[in-house]
């Protein structure tokens, strides 16, 4: 048995491993060396040979590399789900990424009025673009749509009753439930109608009594079909205005483009909601807008002024990188180049023939797999149940779950899906620059 006395000291190893100190710093290197030596000691006690110094240093380096590896890292999305909430929703356009870089490496006029040299407002940066694009009187940008809903209700509905259809009391995912948010804001929920039907009369009746306002929430992740009825947004807005009250519209995904051009079901646009007479409209920045995580609030200037002044507005405010990326994204819409420049619209617009050609090129390069028709989903609480026709590379493997797990272990990790005991890879959501990495990984996964 090797004597534990021949175990090298931390000081000796530190001298040998000066490169590690340069890369990882002394305290972290010392900690890693101690932990490695501890493991080695146990192994030697259990009867193993004393490893050479180089081996101990190598083990230490592996440990250190593991410690500093960022927990949040890029992945390749081969699932075909365009707005995959668990994979970070919308990838940003080149211009949006550049805008974030430009504004974050130094100082900016975030809250500084260059004209007067005095304090300015961060809210103006995306506001002009948003009002131009949508015709809204004003705009407020916050952290995300959930905080937009909380802020709007807190500022406008506190102590009041909020009338909403029972069929719209949704849970979006991640525990965001419309009724819970209302409770948080100090508003009192008044449910009207039944699970499948709500009439204008139901809303009108709810207005008798204490002050009340109307709210509509988009059914983002489910559909009601069959025997259903619901007044239009326009009818709701008119009724609200006749009674001197207001209508709030939580659109969730909030698209600026009409998605029917991709053969999808109609998704109400932000412009339509405002035209129908909604007084305040809320939607996400990273769903069908294709921008950074953000919550966008549009509507009547007097109501938005109240929202801007509410203390919560400060708590949920948007940072400079978000405002920069959002403005760059909005600019694509203003210049009528959204479909060309914003990744989610590029993916949405990709023709099945093109996707088939990409999948076939993968197959040709790999020399295995089959190209078969399939469906890509929109995801991210947008257009539930709607899919786009696609072609996928289908791999027949012994254990699909094992292959998925091994693809997830790659750098960058690859996320795919299985169907009928096959591994499916959808080119629609794989960025062209990621293709070489994906193919190398698949070739290696097939060899084992
Ligand atoms: C997605 C969604 C939200 C939450 O949006 P985040 O930007 O994820 O906070 C709120 N309301 C509706 C209707 C949604 O679809």
Image (cartoon, rainbow, N blue to C red):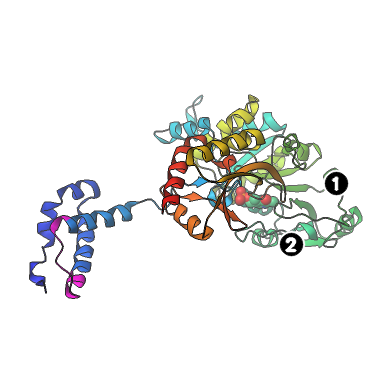
In this picture, is 171 found above or below 431?
below
Q: Which of the two marks, 2 or 1, is nearer to us in this view?
A: 1
The residue lying at 69 percent from left, 42 percent from top is: 388
Residue 147 visible in the current orientation: no
Q: Residue furthest right?
A: 201
Residue shown at 64% from the left, 26% from the top: 334
Residue 188's disc is 2
Percent position of residue 198, x then y: 87, 57
Q: Would residue 106 be found to the left or right of residue 288 on screen?
A: left
User: Does the magenta-highlighted stretch encompass residue 42?
Assistant: yes
Residue 152 in the image, given as x and y percentages of width and height: 67, 49
Task: Point out the residue furthest to the front here.
Answer: 367
**What quarter of the picture does the C terminus occupy?**
bottom left
Q: Which residue is mark 1?
A: 232
Regarding mark 1 in the picture, which secondary structure is present there? loop
Asked if ligand 1 lies within 8 A of label 2, the reply is no
Looking at the rendering, in which quadrant would you find the N terminus? bottom left
In the image, which residues are magenta?
41-54
């Amino acid at each position: 048995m090797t004597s534990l006395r021949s175990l090298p000291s931390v000081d000796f190893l530190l001298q040998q491993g000066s490169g590690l100190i340069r890369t990882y710093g002394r305290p972290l290197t010392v900690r890693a060396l101690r932990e490695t030596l501890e493991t080695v000691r146990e192994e030697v006690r259990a009867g193993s040979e004393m490893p050479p110094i180089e081996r101990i240093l190598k083990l230490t380096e592996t440990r250190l590399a593991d410690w500093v590896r960022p927990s949040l890292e890029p992945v390749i999305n081969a699932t075909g789900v365009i707005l995959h909430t668990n994979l970070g929703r919308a990838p940003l356009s080149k211009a949006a990424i550049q805008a974030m870089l430009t504004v974050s490496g130094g100082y900016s006029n975030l809250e500084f009025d260059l004209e007067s040299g005095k304090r300015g407002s961060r809210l103006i940066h995306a506001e002009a673009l948003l009002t131009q694009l949508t015709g809204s009187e004003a705009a407020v940008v916050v952290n995300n749509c959930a905080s937009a809903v909380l802020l709007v209700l807190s500022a406008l509905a506190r102590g009041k009753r909020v009338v909403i259809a029972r069929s719209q009391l949704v849970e979006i995912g991640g525990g965001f439930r419309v009724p819970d948010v209302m409770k948080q804001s100090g508003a009192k929920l008044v449910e009207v109608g039944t699970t499948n039907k709500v009439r204008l009369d139901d809303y009108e009746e709810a207005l008798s009594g204490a002050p009340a306002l109307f709210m509509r929430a988009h059914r983002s992740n489910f559909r009601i079909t069959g025997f259903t009825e619901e007044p239009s947004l326009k009818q709701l807005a008119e009724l609200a205005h006749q009674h001197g009250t207001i209508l709030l519209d939580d659109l969730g995904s909030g698209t600026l483009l009409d998605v029917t051009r991709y053969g999808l079901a109609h998704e109400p646009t932000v412009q339509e909601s405002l035209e129908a007479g909604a007084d305040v409209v809320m939607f996400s920045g990273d769903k069908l807008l294709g921008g950074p995580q953000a919550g966008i609030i549009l509507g009547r200037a007097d109501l938005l002024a109240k929202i801007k002044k509410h203390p919560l507005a400060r708590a949920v405010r948007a940072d400079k990188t978000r405002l920069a990326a959002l403005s760059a994204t909005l600019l694509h819409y203003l210049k009528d180049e959204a479909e060309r420049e914003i990744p989610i619209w590029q993916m949405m617009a990709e023709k099945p023939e093109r996707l088939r050609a990409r999948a076939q090129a993968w197959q040709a390069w790999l020399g295995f797999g089959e190209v078969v028709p399939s469906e890509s989903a929109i995801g991210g609480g947008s257009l539930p149940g709607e899919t786009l026709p696609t072609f996928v590379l289908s791999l027949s493997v012994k254990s699909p779950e094992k292959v998925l797990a091994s693809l997830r272990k790659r750098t960058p990790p690859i996320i795919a899906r299985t169907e009928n005991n096959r591994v499916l890879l959808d080119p629609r959501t794989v960025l062209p620059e990621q293709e070489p990495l994906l193919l190398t990984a698949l070739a290696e996964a097939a060899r084992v």
